[in-house]
Amino acid sequence: MRIPNHLGVIPDGNRRWAVRNGMTKEKGYDSGLDPGLRVFKLCEEVGIKELTFYGFTMDNTKRPRVQRLAFTKACVDAVKLLSKENAELLVIGNTESKMFPEELMPYTKERKRFGKGGIKVNFLVNYDWKWDVGNLINGNGNPKSPMEYIKSKDISRVDLIIRWGGRCRLSGFLPLQAVYSDFFIVEDLWPDFKEEHFHEALAWYDKQDITLGG
Amino acid sequence: MRIPNHLGVIPDGNRRWAVRNGMTKEKGYDSGLDPGLRVFKLCEEVGIKELTFYGFTMDNTKRPRVQRLAFTKACVDAVKLLSKENAELLVIGNTESKMFPEELMPYTKERKRFGKGGIKVNFLVNYDWKWDVGNLINGNGNPKSPMEYIKSKDISRVDLIIRWGGRCRLSGFLPLQAVYSDFFIVEDLWPDFKEEHFHEALAWYDKQDITLGG
């Protein structure tokens, strides 16, 4: 079976899940922590080398304060969980804004090893696609690739993106790394994660042809 | 019903269709002309204001010469067909390469009106996403939006992308205009276009929430 090198995860549906379960919207984020750890462990098992999680965006921070505090805390807690695993973490996002959690600053300058190292984990926190590509410069004419100039240049091309929650769109997720990505959409909401979702996505990916635009 | 302002069309599957119908691959492109005109007319009917077709990319031109000549001719023929309609055409692509068809040069400098004018039609011809965003400059610090600096800056945000041929990916289609686009995938190949595909896509789009990243 052909395994993607780099998996992108868009963990959507936390708020819808909370409402469906009789809670207020901000209560949904905490239930996204365990799915995240399980996806990480599944990636370890099958040999995926790089994993990017969509944490939250600068646009998301315009939501009600109680929601913002809840999803920010969930991101900090996710890193605490990951720190007990074998992984190499890089957090990418706009650190110059107050919305960026102080606790995650140590992971923004360079990739940080946890345990014995292993999967590269990228975590988009206070990310914004315009912020990401706004750094592109033309330099002295033609740069070899625009990818050398974006803020997320340490994140490689994404092979497969799995999005939970039924929407079929990128919502600003790494637009330049995603140009050739295959998207697999899971109808279930992220807190309703099941291991089958992951395996179904990989089985589907295995059947796609890879042309990289050729 | 909520109608998208801007529809993107990825007309994939011409070569697979030709092979399935006992022809050599390059014979498939000609059968994509009529579907293109029909989509245009459907857009007129429902009131879509802007329509972008993915013609061919710089990467595509590395395919065998006989295929390249066939898809290039189909693009030129498509513009001839469109010229009999009411529309406003802009062709976007790398005109500095020999692969760009001379016949389409007149449509690359500014949007050209056909008939009484009407839908803005954008046609990506010898397009390349790296070429498109490679023009981004940081200017004097922070540009208001990277969208002002890309080569396709006259093409607006895409609301809905319909892709024929079963693949669920962008394949380099306008990465910055597509950040919030909803993708609708049609399993049938482009030459097997049916009007139901279009109507199904619009009915699906009507049910999606629009958050633009919020």
Image: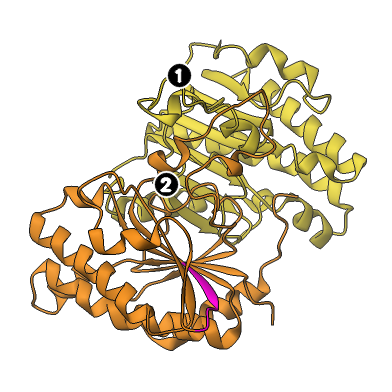
Chain colours: A orange, B yellow
Which class describes the residues within 10 Å of circle 2: few (<14), some (14-19), or many (20+)?
A: many
Where is residue A102, by image quadrant? bottom left
Determine whether B148 is above or below A46 in the image: above
Which amino acid does the dot numbered 1 rest on?
A: Gly
**Looking at the picture, how far across and down is residue A191, in whole percent?**
28, 78
Q: Which residue in the protein does label 1 denote?
A: B118
Which amino acid does the dot numbered 2 rest on?
A: Ser
- Whether residue B152 appears in magenta in the rendering, the answer is no
Residue A189 can be seen, yes or no? no
At a point 8% along the width and 78% down the height, the residue shown is A22
At a point 34% along the width and 40% down the height, the residue shown is B3
**Looking at the picture, how far across and down is residue A212, in whole percent?**
70, 54
Q: Which residue in the protein does label 2 denote?
A: B181
Q: Chain of mark 1?
A: B
Mark 2 to mark 1 CA distance (whole Å): 23 Å
Determine whether A135 is above or below B213 in the image: above
Mark 2 or mark 1, earlier in chain? 1
At a point 62% along the width and 59% down the height, the residue shown is B188
Residue B99 located left or right of residue A130: right
Q: Chain of mark 2?
A: B
Marks 2 and 1: CB-CB under 8 Å?
Answer: no
Under tag 1, what secondary structure?
Answer: loop
The magenta-colored residue range is A116-121
